[in-house]
Image (cartoon, helix red, strand yellow):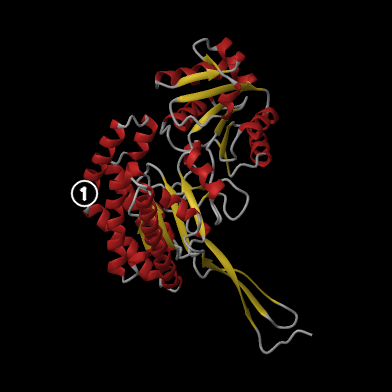
Amino acid sequence: MSTVAIKDSLSALDTTMRAMGTAARDAAAALRVASTDAKNTALLHAAGAIRARRAEILSANVLDMEAATARGTSGAMLDRLKLDDKRVEAMAQGLTDIAALPDPVGRELARWTRPNGLDIQRIATPIGVIGIIYESRPNVTADTGGLCLKSGNAVILRGGSESARSSGAIHAALVEGLRKAGLPEAAIQLVPTTDRAAVGMMLEGLGGTVDMIVPRGGKSLVARVQTEARVPVLAHLEGICHTYVHAKADLAKARALVMNAKMRRTGICGATETLLIDHSALQTHLAPILDDLAKAGCEIRGDKEIVAAWPAAKPATEEDWRTEYLEAIIAVRVVDGVAEATAHIAKYGSQHTECIVTEDNMAAEEFLNTLDSAIVMHNASTQFADGGEFGMGAEIGIGTGKLHARGPVGVEQLTTFKYVVRGTGQTRP
């Protein structure tokens, strides 16, 4: 393509993207005052449309899977991309669950009266226009579209090229729901191109129309968004999650939790990537836990003590403690007590999700109170790090930063607030 043709193509794309931003801004104004009934009607009709279009969605996904397989896409990415009857139903049920949640818009967060009689309220309001940039998982189309709608935000979705057909079929169902509820169809828009230049345009803010960007994908995508964005970003870079088997862990419970935390779905951000085992539990707990993992097809990489105690393990490197595998590999290290376990997590973790397995409640409280991760758990699989499992209907992602939202980001986390001040004629002296 000639230089002139490239410039013309980018100019046309810029025009398209800016028009989407303007339409989203107008839709956000309408959603800000939309009734709860209207939003719920749209969500329920969208859920029904997903169920009615199941065959169409699955057919589109088959084409996406075939193309991804031909490109040599990894097994973890293929698992994220794949849809089946169960996953399609989960998307529909997620929208239904979101509809059942209380409306987060208009909540009174605080209220007080000043000595001069001023009545002050802090009220939850929508953020405005949210841009979602994601890879692989077509269910993100439904989850984020539904969450943004319920929280009164317009959303611009830019899915990955590998899931373009699937996302398009799901988006059509969401638009059907908006149409039947009488809400603007521009409330949920899907970028109509896989051109990577569209991502850069969204990161620049589409002429000031985008209020926040949320990336959902691999480390390279998130890093690019955090580096290039000219608007606020809500993201987590990696999910380096830990499970710590304490000296007083119940063996049966530890075996079940570690197996689920690592192997239920290896390609999600809540999968445990590093197993820490207390030195005092080494003789009783290590072999049964690692035998379970190995039989399930998991590769074990251990420190010197682990290799000595379980020779089938591969020697771990320093890099293993910092790696989000997203596949059937786990790094295993011996630690001596809660303090050493939490020190390891603080040094190598990504502040996502950590679990302690123990029957000692004092040790558990020390672990939970010491760590600064977004989600800390006691005797529960790290794979519960999910908005749906937290009762949020779905999630837009897991926030690991310190500002605005941490942990699963649901409808409440997609609001900001404003102050409403009522007086009776007060003037400031």
Q: Observer-nearest residue: 358 or 124?
A: 124
Residue drawn at x 68%, y 37% is 366
Where is residue 238? Give x, y as percent: 53, 38
Where is residue 265? Give x, y as percent: 41, 34
Where is residue 289? Give x, y as percent: 49, 21
Where is 233 relative to 186, above or below? above
User: Mark 1 sits on what residue?
Assistant: 56
Left or right: 169 with respect to 424? left
Secondary element under disc 1, as helix, strand or loop, is helix
Left or right: 64 with respect to 299? left
Give the quarter of the image for residue 186: bottom left
Where is 103 relative to 60, above or below? below
Give the quarter of the image for residue 358: top right
Q: Observer-nearest residue: 424 or 83?
A: 83
Q: Amino acid at mark 1?
A: Glu
Residue drawn at x 55%, y 28% is 274
Q: Observer-nearest residue: 252 or 145?
A: 145
Few, some or many residues within 10 Å of mark 1 (<14, 14–19, 20+)? some
